[in-house]
Image (cartoon, grey):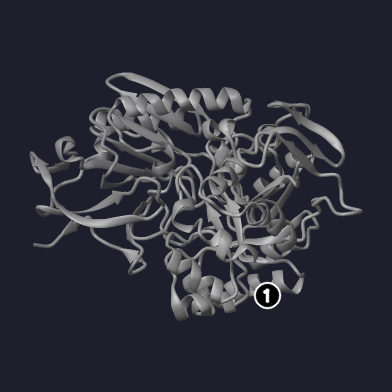
């Protein structure tokens, strides 16, 4: 059968370089991805995109990279890279770039912002499709967004939202990743609109990538009673045709890109061929390792506990409510726990401190409160913090928070967990996003840290992935950037304390 294609993924989320991602993906029958490199672009600009292109070119795997449309994603956080209209146009002129990646600035599209529209026009003039990103956009607003030239959206989390966008002429990438899991809500579309859907993971952490990829989602679709040919249409065919990828679909004259599976129920990949070459067999990758290179942008110095102190200005605070399996959060108001005039974490009510530290320059941390993480002890931190990848941390006390944050700073990027003097860190030396190690090594270390965080009390299925979206001020409703608490509904900063 044709090989699987992930129609929207950030390779950086796997915490390994593209060549290493490919070595694992082919064992699951994936032959190609539509890859948005905006994570590394937010850290290192065009130089980061070039590193991804160079590394990917050294493998048989068929990566299609896009030109990041929104770097920085907003002006409301500090980023390390900036891709203006000229830079985006330069990338779109590169034959290795196949599309304009997700246009997250949907207010800019709706208001027909000149710079936003120039980026879209540059892609359309070159015959390259434009990806969308408009969570929750419905009705006339969704139709106006799509009419600007947007062709896909992977952010739908309700069937009604997806139907509005399909009816406006947009293709829906049904997302099932490590943080956002929308398959159950949207899977009926596979039979209702098989020509208008694709499958994607968006973000796939290394431990889950080792277990499976798009093959798992296809198997779930079959188990849910979806028609086999429709499943193959959305999992294999539609991305290739939509993005005009040079990926074979078992047609005469096509490249010999295909997989041999044990059955059409579980889709266990027996063999994977790319360009006629056997690249994986029975779970073993046959592609060679690729030499690695690193790039980074990390300037922050260690912080002290004093930097996290918040003097209580009222009894009520705005709190970010994290939702398991979703990128969106809720904005709620809770009573503040005050000790000696300072607002502190309240473990009994699951009101924990959340901190964002600017990684690109020394600046005072931004501090707020979050619920949903459920930690009973300790703290976690990460330099994977979409989209600008500053350092984000959540913890039960300032001492462990500082230890976790400084462990990430000491490694110039990575994930950490700290609890009463015990610290573990997974270094990510490539832009603070990726390791130069194997996926097996990274996945094993990540699984150990994930288990440790769950021992500390979190109920979240993927706590580090959920943490990474707490600083993303383009996804509703309340987030914390390095510049302060941000309310996406009003698209502006708000005070932590609520006037009584």
* The image quarter in which residue 475 lies: bottom left
Q: Is residue 263 above or below residue 437?
A: below
- Residue at 68% of width from left, 39% of height from top? 18
Q: Which residue is mark 1?
A: 121
Q: Quadrant of the N terminus?
A: top right
Q: Position of residue 56 (x, y in %)?
A: 74, 41
Front residue (pair 487, 78): 487
Q: Relative to residue 202, is residue 23 drawn left or right? A: right
Q: Position of residue 34 (x, y in %)?
A: 67, 52
Q: Is residue 156 above or below residue 210?
A: below
Q: Is residue 43 visible?
A: no
Q: Counting other residues with Cα less than 10 Å from the Cα at mark 1, is it few (<14), some (14-19), or many (20 or more)? A: some
Q: Relative to residue 61, is residue 20 drawn left or right? A: left
Front residue (pair 161, 383): 161
Q: Position of residue 276 (x, y in %)?
A: 87, 39
Q: Relative to residue 193, is residue 106 drawn left or right? A: left
- Residue at 52% of width from left, 78% of height from top? 143
Q: Quadrant of the C terminus?
A: bottom left
* The image quarter in which residue 310 lies: top left
Secondary element under disc 1, as helix, strand or loop, is helix
Front residue (pair 35, 482): 35
Q: Is residue 238 above or below residue 4?
A: below
- Residue at 66% of width from left, 42% of height from top? 264
User: How many marks do you count on the picture?
Assistant: 1
Furthest-right residue in view? 253
Q: Is residue 18 visible?
A: yes
- Residue at 65% of width from left, 39% of height from top? 267
């Amino acid at each position: 059968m044709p090989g699987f294609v992930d129609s929207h993924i950030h390779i950086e989320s796997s915490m390994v370089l593209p060549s290493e991602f490919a070595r694992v993906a082919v064992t699951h029958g994936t032959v190609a991805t539509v890859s948005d490199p905006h994570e590394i672009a937010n850290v290192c600009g065009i130089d980061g995109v070039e590193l991804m292109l160079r590394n990917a070119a050294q493998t048989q795997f068929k990566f299609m990279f896009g030109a990041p449309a929104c770097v920085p994603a907003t002006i409301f956080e500090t980023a390390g890279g900036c891709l203006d209209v000229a830079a985006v146009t330069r990338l779109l002129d590169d034959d290795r770039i196949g599309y304009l990646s997700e246009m997250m600035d949907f207010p800019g599209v709706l208001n027909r912002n000149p710079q936003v529209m120039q980026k879209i026009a540059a892609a359309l003039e070159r015959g390259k499709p434009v990806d969308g990103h408009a969570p929750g956009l419905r009705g006339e607003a969704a139709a106006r967004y799509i009419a600007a030239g947007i062709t896909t959206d992977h952010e739908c989390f309700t069937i009604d939202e997806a139907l509005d966008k399909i009816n406006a002429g947009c293709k829906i990438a049904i997302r099932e990743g490590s943080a956002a899991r929308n398959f159950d809500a949207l899977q009926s579309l596979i039979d209702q609109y098989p020509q208008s859907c694709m499958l994607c993971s968006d973000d796939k952490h290394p431990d889950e990538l080792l277990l499976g990829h798009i093959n798992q989602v296809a198997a779930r679709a079959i188990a849910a009673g979806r028609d086999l040919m429709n499943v193959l249409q959305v999992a294999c065919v539609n991305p290739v045709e939509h993005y005009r990828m040079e990926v074979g679909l078992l047609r005469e004259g096509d490249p010999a890109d295909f997989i041999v599976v044990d059955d059409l129920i579980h889709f266990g990949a027996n063999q994977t061929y790319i360009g006629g070459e056997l690249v994986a067999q029975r779970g073993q990758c046959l592609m060679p390792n690729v030499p690695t290179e690193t790039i980074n942008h990390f300037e922050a110095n260690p912080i002290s506990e004093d930097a996290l102190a918040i003097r209580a200005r009222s009894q009520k605070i705005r709190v970010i409510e994290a939702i398991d399996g979703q990128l969106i959060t809720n904005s709620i108001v809770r009573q503040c726990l005050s000790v000696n005039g300072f607002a502190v974490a309240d473990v009994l009510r699951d009101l924990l401190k959340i901190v964002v530290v600017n990684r690109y320059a020394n600046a005072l941390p931004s501090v707020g409160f979050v619920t949903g993480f459920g930690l009973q002890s300790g703290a976690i931190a990460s330099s994977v913090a979409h989209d600008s990848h500053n350092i984000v941390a959540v913890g039960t006390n300032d001492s462990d928070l500082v230890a976790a944050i400084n462990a990430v700073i000491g490694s110039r990027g990575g994930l950490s967990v700290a609890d009463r003097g015990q610290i573990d860190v997974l270094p990510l030396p490539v832009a603070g996003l990726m390791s130069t190690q194997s996926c097996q090594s990274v996945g094993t270390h990540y699984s150990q840290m994930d288990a440790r965080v769950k021992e500390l009390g979190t109920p979240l299925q993927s706590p580090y992935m959920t943490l990474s979206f707490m600083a993303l001020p383009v996804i509703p409703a309340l987030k914390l950037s390095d510049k302060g608490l941000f309310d996406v509904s009003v698209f502006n900063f708000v005070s932590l304390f609520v006037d009584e």
